[in-house]
Image (spheres, grey):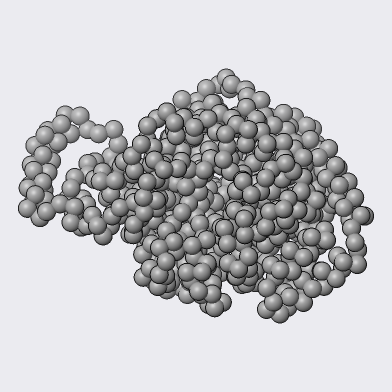
Amino acid sequence: MLFDTESLKEVLAQKESWTREELAKLLAESPERQKRFSSISDQEIPRLCTPDDCGSLDYLEHLGFPGRYPYTRGVQPSMYRGRLWTMRQFAGFGTPEDTNQRYRYLLSQGQTGLSVAFHYPTLMGYDSDHPRSRGEVGKCGVAVDSLRDMEVIFDRIPLDKVTTSMTINGPAGILLAMYIVVAEKQGVTPDRIGGTIQNDILKEYIAQKSWIFPPRPSMRIITDILAYCTRHVPRWNTISISGYHIREAGATAAQELAFTIADGIGYVQAGVDAGLDVDAFAPRLSFFFNAHADFFEEIAKYRAARRLWARIMRERFGARKEASWKLRFHTQTAGCSLTAQQPMNNVVRTTLQALSAVLGGTQSLHTNSMDETLALPTEASVTVALRTQQIIAEESGVTNTIDPLGGSYFVEWLTDEMEKQAQKYIDKIDQMGGIVRAIELGFPQREIGDAAYHYQQQVEKREKIIVGVNKYAMREEIPIPILKIDEEVERRQVENLKEVKRKRDQAAVKKELEKIEKAARSNENLMERFVDAVRVYCTLGEIIGVLRGVFGEHRDPGML
Amino acid sequence: MTEQRKLRILIAKPGLDGHDRGAKVVARSLRDAGMEVIYTGLHQTPEMIVATAIQEDVDAVGLSIMSGAHNVLMPAVVEGLRQKGGGDIVVFGGGIIPDDDIPRLREQGVHQIFTPGTSTENIVKWIRENIKPR
């Protein structure tokens, strides 16, 4: 126990007298500012936490030591005293040439990892010349149609030195295949490259909604990737199990935690069902959480996530390796918390959110830029965002000690609360038959939609305050410069694609596409086929087109 | 006084982006305000949206776009409606839309653009003041 029974009794007795005397007296004279205090997730928050609120916690069982099960205090024994988190700004826009230039700028400014944002057509498996790509090319990320584009993006960036995260899901295997071949051309073998593909299709159905195939064939492609990477790309994080988008879609903190862990359970189960040894692939699973506006709730969420995952991996899946128990995660500050009004305030919001991620023990971090509610960030605003991390890391002093909030009565109470609420959802999803079934039934989608609507109503009633929007609004807005993607980008990208298609070996392309179709119809591993196909410049749209023919397409039920 | 027919509004998500939080919140708010709301779901082409609008005989179409493709997709819906005999259907929109783009979208027939931070109350108010049953 954190506290012995005798002293707890005394604390409780004094708490009661304090409530009756000092507190009651004051409240009679001047009531509190609100009748009910709650977090941004509308989690009710107690006035004061004392040792009795964490009375059931056992130090060694529930907190322990950093780098030791259940990892509540962190996954590494020395945390940031050893190595800082990776500063990884998500970036990508326009043509591959534009993006290559931004990456080389960010690396020159002290950024330590890359993170690729792809444009919508790539996320959805269409080439830039497809009718559905009209107006979208290069807008929300960089356009990638073929290996040629990836060669340009990573031109003069040594792939044995830099790790790269790619936010890609439906076509994740194909983009990883392109990355492997680009590295190969730089003379870097697959066992020496490091990075992450998001490859988390379940949260696409739940929240982010960039899917291609229906859930079940999508899960098959994912297990093919797990099997391939275990053998050939051992340093690659094969799935970044993501709560970020779940939160952005309107989920509460507890829902974000619950549905993310439930997705994780879904992947591990799929891998085990496909005959893989859990300890062979689980160490390469990583997580990705949101850092939202409610400071302590976020810290509690990260701490609860580590404890929850460690227990699930050890107890539920019987994993034996410590690496399988550890929940490593990337964090991005909350895009949806930023405001178009008085955009400079976003720097402050992002700072607080980033600080919560650091106090929660993140392994890598993206800080949003102040202009992201208006457009993709300019170079100037992304520099401020990166500097925010550097100030937290090197000026604030918070990195000097490990888990400084561990033992705070409130933070421990809230951590426990987060874990309990998430566990309740996980039990419910188990009863439904697992996360894939729950998604097919629309369960997480509905819960999130309800939470989003509830929050919006609270904002409109001013029960939740957004500075500069429903309080302290100003008539005069301070204009800031924004990044515009030229319509010319689309024309140039389509030209480049034509050129690639004209110059490649057409017979080889046809042969590889046929092999992909055959593999898709059998149980042959698709990853090997992708690597061979992209090497001869089969385009992303061509490969996905073949797979669409075999697996079909998922459609939005359009549920409100 | 004869009771006026309820307003019928189509909320639509054109293009490839999957950010449907705003569209869904707006759709539910309009429904709670007593309007009939049809929601298309994600990943609609302008042609699909026009066909639904005509078929459902709506009074207005609200387009939600976060991907930056608004300059192409919004005018395409307006033009499609015109061609299919729905030129009097009011088109409005919302999303991540820079101020600089708004005058041209208006010129091209998009009646109103709601940018981030707009309250659903204001959207309901605007619809009541500007859209009448056809």
The N terminus of chain B: image quadrant: top right
- In the image shown, does A178 or A25 lie closer to the viewer? A178
- In the image shown, does A129 or A152 lie closer to the viewer? A152
Residue A290 visible in this rendered orientation of the protein: no
User: Where residue A289 sits: x, y (%)?
Assistant: 48, 50
- Please indicate whether residue B63 sits to the left or right of residue A62 in the image: right
- Please indicate whether residue A538 sits to the left or right of residue A37 in the image: right
- In the image shown, does A542 or A166 lie closer to the viewer? A166
Name the image quarter holding residue A293.
Answer: top left
User: Where residue A526 sits: x, y (%)?
Assistant: 70, 70
Name the image quarter holding residue A380.
Answer: top right
User: Where residue B114 sits: x, y (%)?
Assistant: 63, 37
Q: Residue at coordinates 80% horizontally, 48% vertically from top-left?
A: A134
Q: Residue at coordinates 86% horizontally, 65% vertically from top-left?
A: A509
Name the image quarter holding residue A319.
Answer: bottom left
Q: Residue at coordinates 57% horizontally, 58% vertically from top-left?
A: A235
User: Where residue A463 sits: x, y (%)?
Assistant: 39, 38
Q: Residue at coordinates 39% horizontally, 51% vertically from top-left?
A: A76
